[in-house]
Amino acid sequence: MAMHKAIKKEEGVQKMKAIDCLENALTTIRERGAVYKDSYLIHGDVMKALFPDGVQLKTSEDFARWGVLNMQVSKLVRYTQSWKNPHIDSSHDLGVYSFIQEELDRKHHTEEGKDIPFP
């Protein structure tokens, strides 16, 4: 993973200067870019395809559901960007976000008085 610049230690507490943070950020974006390529651009295309008429978010629930869906799409796009070398972390996270989404959907159905299709 990242080979970040050594951090100066003073009295047992790690301290970084702004320039150190910037150098670490450059290292991170180069490493992630090599794996995920331009996934952030593809992400926008996928969201537009899923919601061609846009989406309206008003409630906290709307934003929570959108946030989780956004993470699912992000993980799916990242996974496809590393097809030749499957990114297991993205697969794992995608599963986790799916169950978080199910929790939110169950809450929505319950509050709306709707039947929940699965036990």
Image: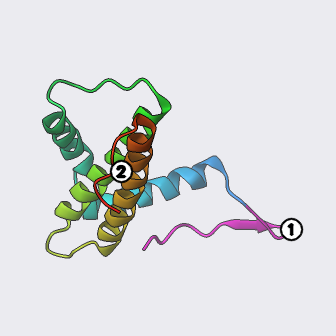
Q: Main secondary structure of the magenta part?
A: loop
Helix, strand or loop at disc 1?
loop
- Quadrant where the C terminus sits is bottom left
Q: Position of residue 56 (x, y in %)?
A: 32, 23
Q: Position of residue 65 (x, y in %)?
A: 39, 41
The label shown at residue 11 is: 1
Q: Is residue 12 left or right of residue 62?
A: right
- Comparing marks 2 and 1, which lies closer to the viewer? 2
The magenta stretch spans which residues? 1-14
Residue 118 against residue 114 in the figure, above or below = below
Q: Residue at x 40, y 49 (%)?
A: 106
Figure quadrant of residue 86: bottom left
- Which residue is more in the foreground, 7 or 81? 81
- Judge whether residue 8 is colored magenta: yes
Q: Which residue is mark 2?
A: 71
Q: Dot 1: few (<14), some (14–19), or many (≥20) neighbours within 10 Å?
A: few
Q: Is residue 35 left or right of residue 101?
A: left
Label 2 to label 1: alpha-carbon separation = 39 Å
- Judge whether residue 24 is colored magenta: no
